[in-house]
Image (tube, rainbow, N blue to C red):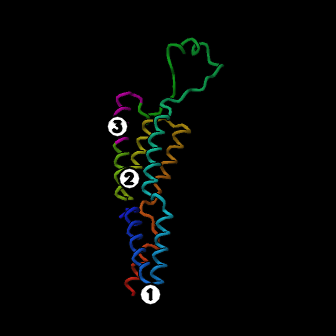
């Protein structure tokens, strides 16, 4: 069920129960139990805990993304641009990026909702909902910030998070139970 700490405690109880039995018939069972415990210990805090921390770090880095791209300062501007530049600011606009403050606030709220849905899917271990929520976060990321190297980096990090397998497949798990059933 994804409760690594509970599984570790139960494997510890099973190991102490097996240690009290001195029969050589239980050697394979002990070895299978040791393999399962080592596989669980290799996971560390778990995929979900690690991924949740990475998602929080990713969300925290969003505030450092530039909202507007700076146009390159060109010293060889025509005289009329130099004359009007203090009055009029011309910058290329991406039609997909939201500029109005009210739109940005609403879009940022939507992004926060999607991040909450991603966290909930992560807690449940629901791969499909996790991927869908991160896809929607990516859509809001593209709407809120113009294309920049920082945004591209955040998108790449989001794709890495999307590819995380929330329920790792460990072939060792269940081998102790199989040994018990065969006995």
Circle 1/circle 2 CB separation < 8 Å: no
- Residue occupied by mark 2: 132
**Residue depth check, mark 1 versus mark 2: number of the one nearer the observer:** 1
Residue 147 image point, x, y percent = 51, 37
Bounds of the magenta segment: 99-112
Foreground pick, 48 / 19:
19
Query: In front: mark 3 or mark 2?
Result: 3
Give the residue drawn at x 44%, y 45%: 56
Mark nearer the viewer, 1 or 3: 1
Task: Confirm whether residue 61 shows in the render.
Answer: yes
Picture mark count: 3
Residue occupied by mark 1: 23
Residue 171 in view here: no
Q: Residue 60 falls in which quadrant of the image?
A: top left
Crowd class of label 2 (few under 14; some 14 to 19; many from 20; radius 10 Å): some
Q: Is 181 covered by the magenta stretch? A: no
Q: Residues within 10 Å of mark 1 (few under 14, many from 20)?
A: few
Furthest toward the right, the residue is: 76
Q: Residue at x 39, y 76 (%)?
A: 17
Residue annotated with mark 3 = 109
Mark 3 vs mark 2, CA separation in Å: 17 Å
């Amino acid at each position: 069920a994804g409760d690594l700490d509970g599984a570790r405690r139960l494997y510890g109880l099973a190991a102490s129960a097996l240690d009290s039995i001195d029969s050589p018939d239980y050697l394979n069972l002990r070895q299978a139990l040791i393999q399962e415990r080592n596989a669980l210990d290799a996971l560390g805090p778990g995929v979900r805990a690690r991924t949740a921390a990475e998602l929080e770090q990713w969300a925290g880095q969003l505030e450092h993304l530039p909202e507007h791209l700076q146009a390159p300062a060109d010293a060889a501007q025509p005289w009329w641009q130099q004359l009007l530049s203090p009055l009029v600011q011309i910058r290329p606009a991406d039609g997909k990026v939201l500029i109005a403050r009210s739109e940005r606030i609403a879009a940022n709220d939507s992004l926060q909702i999607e991040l909450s849905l991603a966290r909930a899917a992560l807690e449940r271990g629901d791969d499909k909902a996790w991927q869908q929520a991160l896809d929607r976060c990516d859509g809001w990321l593209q709407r809120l910030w113009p294309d920049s190297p920082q945004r591209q980096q955040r998108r790449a990090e989001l794709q890495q998070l999307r590819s995380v397998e929330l329920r790792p497949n460990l072939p060792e798990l269940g081998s102790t139970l199989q040994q018990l059933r065969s006995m």
